[in-house]
Image: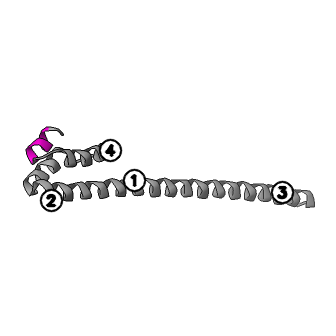
Amino acid sequence: MCRGDGLADWTRFESLTEEMDMIAERILEEIEEHREEGRVEGRAEGRVEGQRGLLRGQIVRKFGDETAGEWSKRSPTLDDGERLLELGGLIIDCETGEEFLNRL
């Protein structure tokens, strides 16, 4: 084996090593991006769940368990923050549980 072949192999090895390092760096960046997206989504979901819990407590306090139960049946997947804020206003505006449920 002549010296030139070994040098060429070493150069190819270094090149492959650099490529592998770049790929690993890109993978780590992608993982971090996905983690951050998950954190943001988790915080948003937590806020919505917190709002739902607060609204349910307010509905129970003002109108009773029956109205709160009916509200939960009608909006089991409600996750729109704006709509939840509107419902908070309805709790204040409505005089009875029946009125509240009719205005949903």
**Distance between the alpha carbons at the discs numbered 3 and 4:** 57 Å
Q: Depth check: 38 or 48 in front?
A: 48
**Distance between the alpha carbons at the discs numbered 3 and 1:** 50 Å
Q: Nearer the viewer, mark 3 or mark 4?
A: 4
Q: Are marks 1 and 4 in contact (CB under 8 Å)?
A: no
Q: Which mark is residue 27?
A: none
Q: Give the mark, 3 or 4, whose residue is nearer the N terminus.
A: 3
Kindly identify which residue carries mark 3.
11
Q: Are marks 3 and 2 in contact (CB under 8 Å)?
A: no
| Range drawn in magenta | 97-102
Kindly identify which residue carries mark 4.
80
Kindly identify which residue carries mark 2.
61
Q: Is 13 situated above or below 78?
A: below
Amino acid type, label 4:
Asp
Q: 82 left or right of 8?
A: left
Kindly identify which residue carries mark 1.
44
